[in-house]
Image (cartoon, rainbow, N blue to C red):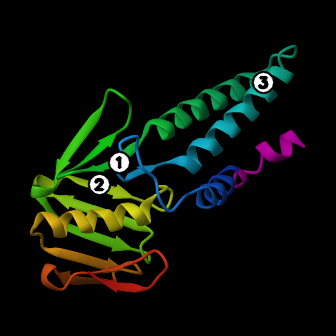
């Protein structure tokens, strides 16, 4: 049974996509109450897969072979991926967005340098473009995306930040730009709302 699952390459990606979508929450906040995006689903799935590979490696401990080393490497890679997913956070603070991959590596993007927002797939993906080609890209794997988008637009409106506009895209190559005077964003539910 284990060999069958390991020889079926689509099982792990399907499990990650399935679990990551169902483990996401609408609202994530940090300890200070600021909106945060987290990779909750991928962390749990990668950690579970790492534990599974570790248990398979331990079961084959008395019979070291090429598969034993493969199980150990796959477990190590999944543990590293789960560590990254656990520590990856995108937090909206007053006047800036902070992206942290580990407690040490952080990047700050100030909203005064924001150029445009790009919303794709009925609000499932958000790309925030800043000056000098810097950008933050979020996906449907990020837990807390609807609340983050709502609070980001509130912060932009409250701070009087000017930017080129919001681009909507539901399909590849289908982009419509909305000027910042008439801002509109597609909510995750698929309905449009005026701000």
Task: Give the percent coordinates (x, y) of residue 119.
Answer: 34, 72
The residue singled out by tag 3 in the image is: 57
Distance in Å between CA atoms under marks 3 and 1: 35 Å
Q: Report if residue 101 lies within the magenta region.
A: no
Image quadrant in which the N terminus is located: top right
The residue singled out by tag 2 in the image is: 136
Residue displayed at 74% across by 27% down: 54
Distance in Å between CA atoms under marks 3 and 2: 38 Å
Image vertical order of residue 139 relative to residue 85, above or below: below
Residue displayed at 69% across by 54% down: 15
Q: Nearer the viewer, residue 164 or 111?
A: 111
User: Nearer the observer, disc 3 or disc 1?
Assistant: 1
Badge 3 marks a residue whose secondary structure is helix
Question: Along the polypeptide, which appears first: circle 1 or circle 2?
Answer: 1
- The numbered dot on residue 66 is none
Q: Nearer the viewer, residue 129 or 190?
A: 190
Q: Nearer the viewer, residue 34 or 120?
A: 34
Badge 2 marks a residue whose secondary structure is strand
Write down the quadrant of residue 180 in the picture: bottom left
Badge 1 marks a residue whose secondary structure is strand
State which region is magenta: 1-11
The residue singled out by tag 1 in the image is: 90
**Residue at the farthest top position:** 62
For the residues labelled 1 and 2, say whether their Cβ atoms are less than 8 Å apart.
yes
Left or right of residue 156: residue 123: right
User: Nearer the observer, disc 1 or disc 2?
Assistant: 1
């Amino acid at each position: 049974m284990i060999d069958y699952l390991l020889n079926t390459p689509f099982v792990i990606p399907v499990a990650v996509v399935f679990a990551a979508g169902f483990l996401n929450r609408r609202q994530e906040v940090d300890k200070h109450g600021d909106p945060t995006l987290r990779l909750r689903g991928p962390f749990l799935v990668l950690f579970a897969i790492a534990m599974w590979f570790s248990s398979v490696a331990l079961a084959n401990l008395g019979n070291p072979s090429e598969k034993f080393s493969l199980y150990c490497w796959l477990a190590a890679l999944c543990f590293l991926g789960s560590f990254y997913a656990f520590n990856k956070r995108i937090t909206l603070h007053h006047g800036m967005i902070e992206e942290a991959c580990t407690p040490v590596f952080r990047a700050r993007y100030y909203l005064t340098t924001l150029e445009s927002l790009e919303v794709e797939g009925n609000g499932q993906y958000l790309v925030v473009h800043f000056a000098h080609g810097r950008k933050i890209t979020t996906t449907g794997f990020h837990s807390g995306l609807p609340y983050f988008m709502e609070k980001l637009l509130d912060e932009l409106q409250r701070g009087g930040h000017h930017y080129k506009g919001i681009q909507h895209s539901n399909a590849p190559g289908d982009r419509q730009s909305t000027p910042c005077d008439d801002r509109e964003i597609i909510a995750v539910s698929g309905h449009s709302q005026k701000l």
